[in-house]
Every structure is written in structure tokens, then in C-alpha cells.
Image (spheres, rainbow, N blue to C red):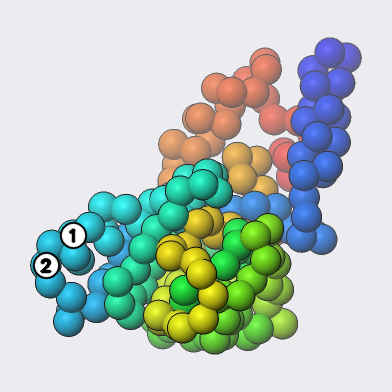
Amino acid sequence: ALVLLAVVFAFVARAAFVTVPGATRLSPTSVSMQSSPALPPEVQALEAQTVSLVLDRDTRSEFVAYGDGTIELKLEGTTEVRALKVFGAAPYTLTVKALENGAWNVVPGLDKIKLATLPETWNTFTATAPVTTATLQVELTPAAGGKATGLKEIELWGTQAHGLTPNIAANPSSLATLLANTPGGTLPAPLRE
């Protein structure tokens, strides 16, 4: 009974923080930066070292791209991506692309988003047609206007519940981790199916 109460509480608490209907926040397993080749090597290295700031869950820190660049995000497995959230203004135009069948395709509704004059809050951009992918690119193009100096934070939203629906085929150790962190070492009935 206590375990059931804890599971119900966890789902209710999680539901209270979901702000994209029908979706949960996705946590990429890796992030990397492809800088403009026109930038000096030391600037490219700085971008590569600081790109993780866009996912650090701290809206006070910011990542600065000094030219056109692409942030690549790998997810735990194939996931339906439904939305992107951006905190505050940033001096860029942003486009999201998904790797589908070996080709990079623009995510409908997440193309050429102007970030320069966004309000200092979470801004949600919903894909007009969700895509299913394991890898995304976030292309940044410097843009004029506004007072922002960098990109503070981004979040991806989709259907894979972080920590509850691991991709066992892509990462067999996920099952062992899930079971080790589950009281009694068995999955609750809704997750066994």
C-alpha cells in the first residue's frame, strides 16, 4: 500500500509540473556543438566547452554562440518530440531539425524562431507535426535586436517519460537500473506491459 501511495504521489507531482499537454520534459543523453568553421579554433573550443549550459536547468547561466552553429542533442532512444521551450530572449534565430531515415529534416513549426525579443520567461513552441527521432539539431543563427547576450536554457518535450520508459533495446542496462531503483525489484503493473 505504501509503495502504491508513493507511485501515485510521484505521478501526481509529475503531472503538476507538465506544461506541454500530453508531453513530458525529455533529457538528452548527450549534447555537442558544431561551430562555424570560420571561427578561430579557440572560440570553437569555448563553444564546445560551454554548450551544456543550455541544458543545465539554471536560467541564470547562458551559452554564447559566436557565429552560426548547431547544437546536436541525442535522446535515450527513439522519442516523439512535440515541443521546444526556450527561457528568455537570445540573440539568435533558431531552427530544430530531426534525424529521420538518415536525413536532417526541419521539425514543422520549429523553423526560424526569432528569439531576440522574447519575454524573460519560459516560451513554448509547439511542433505543428510531432516527429519521432533519437537525434536533434538546434541550429542557431545570430540575429540583431533585443538586449540578450546568450541562450539561457532550452527544454525538449515529448512522449517518452524520462526515467519511466527507457529504451531497453538501445541500452540494456536501463532495465537493470530501473529494477534496482524500484521497490521489490518489479515494475508496477502499468509499466509491465
* SS of the residue under disc 2: helix
Residue at image coords 55%, 59%: 154
Q: Residues within 10 Å of mark 2 (few under 14, many from 20)?
A: few
Q: Is residue 108 left or right of residue 76?
A: right
- Residue 129: image location, x then y, percent: 69, 81
Compared with residue 166, is residue 82 higher up or lower down, i.e. above or below?
below
Q: Say whether residue 65 is left or right of residue 41.
A: right
What residue is rendered at 60% in x and 59% in y? 87
Q: Which residue is mark 1?
A: 45
Q: Residue furthest front?
A: 147
Q: CA distance from mark 2 to mark 1?
A: 6 Å
110 vs 18, left or right, is left
Question: In this rendering, does residue 28 appear at all?
Answer: no
In contact (CB < 8 Å): disc 2 and disc 1: yes
- What residue is shown at x 65% (from left), y 41% (from top)? 164
Q: Amino acid at mark 2?
A: Pro
136 and 89: which is toward the camera: 89
**Quadrant of the rendering where the N terminus is positioned:** top right
Q: Eyeballing the image, is 84 above or below 164?
A: below
Residue 110, horizontal then vertical, whole percent = 60, 80
- Element type at mark 1: helix
- Residue in front for this viewpoint, 72 or 161: 72
Viewer-closest of 39 and 33: 39
Instruction: Give the number of marks.
Output: 2
Instruction: Inspect this view and state whether residue 181 appears.
Output: yes
